[in-house]
Amino acid sequence: MAIPMPMVQDIRRLDRQGLSRAQIARRLHVDRGTVAKYADMRDCSPRPKTDRRYGSKIDPYTHLVDSWLEADRLMPRKQRHTIKRVHERLLAETDYDGEYSTTLRYVHRWREANRSGADQQGFIRLDWRAGSM
């Protein structure tokens, strides 16, 4: 949990005045580790989050999975690949060694991105002319 900026300023001011970190912690009712963290900090401006995404294990096989899922669009709904079947097929037919959850996330993203117009709307508006049933 972050502490309020005025408290951070108090920690830094008291540290510059020469108080020990234990004294600062007692005076401001915070942990000594928190005092050390903010006293040693050179720049208190918030850092932007770093992009931790790296290549996924499924990346080399996306063209193959895309072709399977694209072919499934022409098939009846009951005959399409399930995510489990896509994962099993990847393991059997290629040297893919990724986890099921990786396959799950990729197929979910693919289906969301390639959803047809009829699937996106989800309903049909009923219009009734006056005097007819």
Image (tube, rainbow, N blue to C red):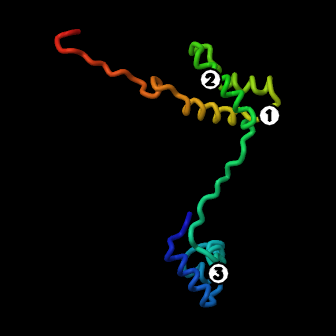
Label 3 residue SS: helix
Q: What number is the disc on residue 70?
A: 2
Q: Name above or below for residue 109 compared with residue 37.
A: above
Mark 1 and mark 3: span between their CA atoms? 51 Å
Mark 1 and mark 2: span between their CA atoms? 23 Å
Label 1 residue SS: loop
Tell me the residue that label 1 is attached to: 97
Rendering coords of residue 98 (x, y %): 76, 35
Q: Amino acid at mark 2?
A: Glu
Please tell me which residue is depicted at 56% across the width and 15% down the height of the picture: 77
Q: Closer to the camera, 81 or 26?
A: 81
Please tell me which residue is depicted at 62% across the width and 88% down the height of the picture: 19
Rendering coords of residue 15 (x, y %): 61, 85
Rendering coords of residue 30 (x, y %): 58, 73
Q: Closer to the camera, 25 or 7?
A: 7
Tell me the residue that label 3 is attached to: 22
Question: Mark 1, mark 3: which one is toward the viewer?
Answer: 1
For label 1, count other residues whose C-alpha is less than 10 Å away and answer few (under 14), some (14-19) or many (20+): few
